[in-house]
Amino acid sequence: MAEMLIKNREVCIDLAKAESEDEVIEILEREGYWVDPSAWIDFGYNENNFSTIGNQQSSPDAALVEKIINSVDALLMRGCMEKGINPLNTEKAPTSIYAALEDFFCIYSGRLTNLQVSERNELAENIKLIATGSRSKPCYTIIDEGEGQTPNKMPDTFLSLNKSNKLRIPFVQGKFNMGGTGVLQFCGVHNVQLIISKRNPLILKEDDRFVDDSSTYWGFTVVRRFDPSGEVRSSVYKYLAPSRKILRFEADELPLAPTSSDAYGMPVTGGAFIKLYDYQMSASLRTNILFDLYNRLSLLMPEIALPVRMYERRDYTGHTLETTLTGLNIRIEEDKRSNVEEGFPTSAVIHFESLELPVKLVAFKEGQDKKYTTKEGILFAINGQTHGYAEKTFFKKKSVGMAYIADSILVIVDCSKIPGRAREDLFMNSRDRLRKGEVYKKLMGELEELISNHAGLRELKDKRRRELLDRKSEDDEPIVEAIEKVMKKSPTLNKLFIQGKKITNPVNPTGGKDKTKFEGKEFPTYFMLEKEYPKENPRNVEEMRRCRIKYKTDARNDYFSRESHSGEISLFLNREEYTDFQMNLWNGYGTLNVSLPKTASKGMSYTLSLEVSDPTQTEPFSSEFTLEVIQKTEHGKGEKGKRKPPSERDKKDSDKSPEGLALPNIIEVRKDEWGIYNHDEETALEVRDAGVDGYDFFINMDNIYLQTEKVAKKNSVDTIERQYKYGLVLLGLGLLNGIENKNENEDYTVEDIQAISSYIAPFLIPTIDSLHESVNDASH
């Protein structure tokens, strides 16, 4: 027996130090386990487990996050047990992750922002993420000093499915008991994963060995995938358990933690060691772990509960090959001066249908967003972990109107307070995707309202657009005249656009005056109505429309969304709490956006009172105002957002300047400017929606197909460029006409014009030439 235990220890260490799936298979073949079907047990005791395990995270990075979150949970569980508290004791156990972090790790308010850098680094030694193996086929190891499991308990914890292990523990993330199985399909060819664990000695009791005779042992197993065969029609995941028992051995410690220069050597005394072999991480994330993967994990865990120490131990060199992962919010705060626009991050709160959602809005300086995000525009997070996202294209929607700063915006929606049913309706169990049902649609509608009307974002959008247009001074009168000639012959375009009207650069939203820099206070000294609306002089609000009420305050912009000591807001309608409103802050002003009850009709009045509080106040800031409902009126638009034609307006309206879409600004882009405009050699036409200012057309004059035509016809360069430019502008106008008149169930947008024009660009000039020749031939 003693020899077997010693042998098991050697096999365990060999597996831990193996740096490829092939090495693992070689070791298991050597021991006679790989080809012995009796040595393997169905994962979760379920031969149909592929239906569950195969339906987890859709990307390898999101699956890796689940492993890290499991380690965070294990640390929280250990902290609870060290205090002698049963995690299931609803009277003594913490009721939230933040309370647990404060109780067990002395983190004030449970927020890592309240720790010094040195304190975060020290705390991070409890959870380690190490990259080993090769650059093309990396191995990732997660080591935690959490509660750990005994060999006898591993089948019911690490190797179980759909059990309620954490379901009734409020201070942990994991609820669905998938065992972090999402990583398996990304592990090599055979989906091999190693699990080593030992019950943490810090929480062992003297009599534990009488309850569990494996309480002082290390246990280890390998998980692998068996392909479909015979009557078994789907793959099956199994784990190594010869004689139906997890392999085990006794040892005080194992030399498996990284040293300052090597992947192994420092002692591990308990907790868990999990290794993923030949992990199929996307190519862009296989680089040095301290760069791209660090950035990606920060995005997927914007407010991670506990820090993680990351080690690069492949054949990379550098000043340092380790760092601490603390989440996106801390990264943004630490880099704010150089990477974030002044005044941001700023905060808002959305309330609808009894849901409360704090929102953080970040605007990066031009080009700096690439350090933090790729295509993600809105993150939906629960307890600091991203559970889904919306792409940046959301900001380019006409109803949002932020095309000029779409790449620079990041919105983080904290969904931690969403109750169970709504959370289930919004998020998939895999915790990396959204269910696009009614809750999602209503939430996106609220975000659309918030972002499109946010004063800070609108100022930044106008500033960026003005700067971009100021870079160009070309006189495009010839092309305007050419287009107007075409429009005179086209009733369709004539209705859509206003002849003779050309967009000019937007005016300075500050009226040409420099604004005094706003210096907000961490805790406001006032939060008051900008204008009073008493019962005898109420604010009018039309039926079925939102009402915006302005407040003055000296609160910092991040007051409602910051990680620590954030402000709380409550609204009462006729003395009862009301939950259909938004509040956002920007440079000394708060904007309250209220939707009245659907039953509100002409003549009804409502008294609303707002309360704002934070931990420093003994009494909340309180204000009261009255709204009176008036009849809904149309505001110059017909169906589908189209402006009414003059025949449908009264004479007073017809005296105003004509409505419709103004002719676009037409800006030529050259190769040395591609980086500014995010263009490449195949880009032809980009159309940006400037909201009330119409559209701006950016034409890539160094398009590869245009250059090819110019080389072939050196004597007609000017003509070819005009054909190309005029053709693209008319194409863009035609596509805009289609978009303006599209059906509600059609989802193509202005952004699609760029792709369409790039597809057409190779054929544009040859087609124009052919048509010209055909016309000439016919005339003769």
Image (tube, grey):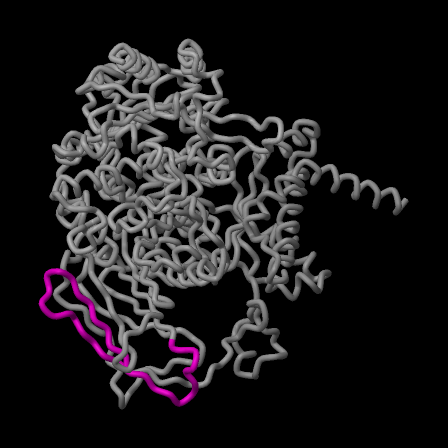
**Residue ID at (45%, 53%):** 395
Q: Would residue 469 be visible to someone looking at this image?
A: no
In what quadrant of the picture does the N terminus appear?
top left
634 and 79: which is toward the camera: 79
Locate residue 609, reporting x and y percent: 24, 77
Locate residue 269, reporting x and y percent: 18, 24
**Residue ID at (56%, 83%):** 651
Is 235 placed above or below 769 here?
above
Is residue 603 within the magenta segment?
yes
Locate residue 100, reporting x and y percent: 18, 47
Q: Would residue 394 be visible to someone looking at this image?
A: yes
137 and 668: which is toward the camera: 137
Locate residue 770, reporting x and y percent: 79, 39
Is residue 262 within the magenta segment?
no
Q: Quadrant of residue 204?
A: top left
Is 16 placed above or below 749 here?
above
Q: Which residues are magenta?
A: 596-625
71 displayed left or right of 554: right
